[in-house]
Amino acid sequence: MKMIYLAIGLIFSALVLMLILHAKDSIGRQTVGGGQKAKEQPSLEIPAGDQADQNKSMTISSPIFVHNGGLPISATCGGKGVNPPLEISGTPKDAKSLALIFEDPDAPNGTFIHWVLWNIDPSTIIIKENSVPDGAFEGITSENRPGYVAACPPSGTHRYFFYLFALDTALDLPASTTAIELEHAMEGHVIESTHIAGLYR
């Protein structure tokens, strides 16, 4: 009888071992299959908005500084403190007006607004140094006054952005309009936008 019990025990142990090995093999196959599935997932597509940006033609530039280059001293508190000359090209034919916001997003207390303009004639191709385009309106800056505020960072290198917007309408806004109020007024009217940035420390 002892031999029979021993044989039964050995058979039972072998069956348990076979079941364990089969389970491990199944788990291994599932893991490999999952990895293969992950690799087969399609790559992310470029959003339609980004594709549209690549097709935009309107640009803003300057004859005295390049995008992401040094802002000219004349546009800062270290020089004359006047707006640099800006050149505009590729304005959409159906634009009724242009708007411009000049800002410093690196200011210690939040974005500092240096210049606010709207109702710029869409046929404008250059904004001359130290000037406001004929017929355009200037809004209120972070110094609580209209006009251009020179770049003057308290410390470190700051980025200064000139944002240009082509609108499908002219705007009827008071002289007390701030950049935020201008942005609200432009909602739903922006045909195209572009920008140029300069650095200064």
Image (cartoon, grey):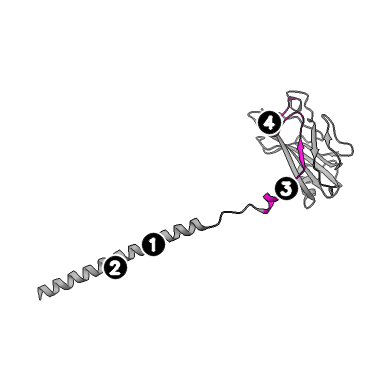
Q: Earlier in the sequence, mark 1 or mark 2?
A: 2
Secondary structure under badge 1? helix
Q: CA distance from mark 1 to mark 2?
A: 16 Å
Identify which residue is drawn at 73% across, 23% down.
Answer: 78
Badge 3: residue crowd in 10 Å (few <14, some 14–19, many ≥20): few
Q: Nearer the viewer, residue 116 or 128?
A: 128
Q: Nearer the viewer, mark 3 or mark 2?
A: 3
| Residue 139 spot, x, y in % from top left | 82, 39
User: Which region shows up in magenta?
Assistant: 48-73
Q: Which residue is mark 1?
A: 29
Can you tell which of label 1 and label 2 is closer to the viewer? 1
Image coords of residue 149 (percent x, y): 77, 31
Residue that badge 4 annotates:
69
2 and 4 marks in contact (CB < 8 Å): no
Q: CA distance from mark 4 to mark 1?
A: 55 Å
Using the numbered discs, state the Cα–Cα distance from disc 3 to disc 2 in whole angstroms.
62 Å
Question: Mark number for residue 55?
Answer: 3
Asked if residue 140 can be seen in this view, the reply is no
Residue 173: mark in rendering: none
